Image (tube, coloured by chain):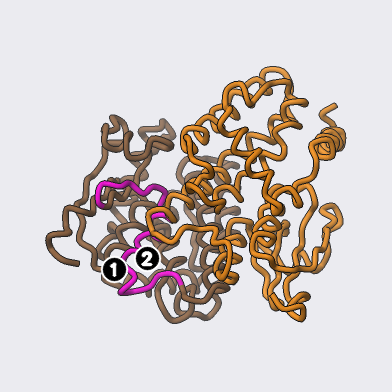
Chain colours: A orange, B brown
């Protein structure tokens, strides 16, 4: 991407957001330079509200002044605009449908459930752990012995899931359980993803995420 | 599509499902012949369970023996496989992202809310009507004075939304309210869609849908 295009790509985001991390990993994969604008989610900026009037949430990718919202929509947009390099969705329609199905599965299931891992206590926490392990096991079966979800190349489903892998350690510490014991393939996959510059550059270290979730717990009065 | 391809496309569906109707409208738009297999959702068939092991839900499109699940994923698959005719997603990345954003908005918001329109009573019903009208108003603003959501041509967002328009009359009768008064543009859009063979052929008439929802209410013990 030419240097003078730089300011043409702006990302409204929050450092700890797994949805924002998806977008940043996709931009890194494509080698797109962009202006990063950390957002205050308590006092939302006019730019955020005007760019995403429906949800007023991050991430928002603003490209040539036009906002694109919702992380999986943004990642597909990035894949279509910067199609010269690192394709994220496969080329063949059936494989594309599979990738969209699994990315959607992650969206529908994992966030709500992982939120319960650090918000709940007692029985509700046990229920959350059970639900979470069921989701991860479903993904473990789908991954099987493949290197990445789509086969040999890092792609759409990997981008959708890996920011949550970046929180596994924090979930384990907070909720006191072990993911690798039951799902060794998913954990090995996550470590493979972490070897990629695009992923290791974007995902914060475990301790920082752990402290962030503890801070959220305090903020929400869970402690 | 050649006649000998006919049995290569099989649809597992339920006549009254707005999600299944999306898929059937897309197949009609493309002129794809297919074998329709009505499913019993109480005693689910082995074929349905094996074709959609994650959700065990309709619709499932089976193409050359390979199942594709989740209605919006299926509609995109249909658009990519039968790309020779009636494109549903626009060609330009930003317009594609907008279409995906709004189809996803409909998925996230409208079904849960419309279910409350025929399931709830009293205050919860008033809340459901208020939420529903807010969603429809948001869509009314997005539609504006365009013929279809993407401009002049019937496309992805129209396919995603029109099966719910096909239930507007039933919702109004059951919940005793008027949609057109507050959202005349959406109602005019729905009527325009109904002039298309693909839509009028697939959507059941108002009375049949009304009776189906009354039957569901009885089945769930709402009466």
Report the chain holding disc 2.
B
Q: Is residue B148 left or right of residue A130?
A: left
Report the chain holding disc 1.
B
Marked residue nearer the N-terminal end (1 or 2): 1
Query: In the displayed image of the protein, which residue is found farthest to the top?
Result: A122
Mark 2: few, some, or many residues within 10 Å (few <14, many ≥20)?
many
Mark 1: few, some, or many residues within 10 Å (few <14, many ≥20)?
many
**Residue at (26% x, 50% y) in the render:** B11
Camera-nearest residue between A42 and A22? A22
Q: Are marks 1 and 2 in contact (CB under 8 Å)?
A: yes
Q: Is mark 2 on a helix, strand or loop?
A: helix
Q: How far apart are marks 1 and 2 (CA)?
A: 8 Å
Q: How many marks?
A: 2
**Which range of residues does the magenta coloring cover?**
B64-89
Q: In this view, does B97 lie to the left or right of A18?
A: left
Q: Name the residue under label 1.
A: B30
- A215 to A46, vertically: above or below: above
Q: Position of residue B3 (x, y in %)?
A: 12, 63
- B5 to B55, vertically: above or below: below
Q: Is residue A153 left or right of residue A207?
A: left
**Which disc is residue B79 wearing?**
2
Camera-nearest residue between B137 and A38? A38
Q: Position of residue B13 (x, y in %)?
A: 29, 47
**Residue at (76% x, 32% y) in the render:** A170
Q: What element carries label 1?
A: helix
B102 drawn magenta:
no
Dividing the picture into quadrants, the one containing residue A39 is bottom right
Camera-nearest residue between A22 and B202? A22
Q: Mark yes or no: residue B73 visible.
A: yes
Camera-nearest residue between B183 and B202? B202
Q: Position of residue A136 (x, y in %)?
A: 56, 32
Dividing the picture into quadrants, the one containing residue B197 is bottom left
């Amino acid at each position: 991407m030419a240097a003078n295009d730089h300011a043409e790509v702006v990302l409204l985001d929050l450092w700890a957001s797994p949805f924002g991390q998806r977008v940043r990993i996709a931009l890194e994969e494509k080698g797109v330079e962009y202006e990063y604008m950390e957002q205050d989610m308590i006092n939302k900026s006019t730019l955020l509200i005007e760019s995403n009037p429906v949800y007023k949430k991050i991430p928002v990718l603003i490209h040539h002044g036009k906002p694109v919202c919702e992380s999986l929509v943004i990642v597909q947009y990035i894949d279509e605009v910067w199609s010269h390099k690192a394709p994220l969705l496969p080329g063949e329609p059936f494989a594309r449908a599979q990738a969209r199905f699994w990315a959607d599965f992650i969206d529908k299931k994992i966030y709500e459930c992982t939120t319960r891992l650090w918000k709940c206590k007692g029985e509700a926490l046990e229920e959350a752990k059970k639900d979470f392990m069921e989701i991860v096991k479903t993904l473990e079966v789908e991954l099987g012995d493949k290197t990445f979800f789509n086969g040999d190349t890092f792609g759409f489903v990997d981008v959708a899931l890996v920011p949550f892998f970046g929180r596994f350690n924090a979930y384990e510490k907070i909720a006191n359980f072990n993911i690798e014991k039951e799902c060794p393939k998913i954990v090995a996959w996550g470590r493979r993803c972490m070897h990629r510059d695009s992923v290791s550059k974007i995902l914060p270290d475990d301790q920082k995420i752990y402290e962030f979730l503890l801070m959220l717990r305090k903020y929400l009065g869970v402690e």
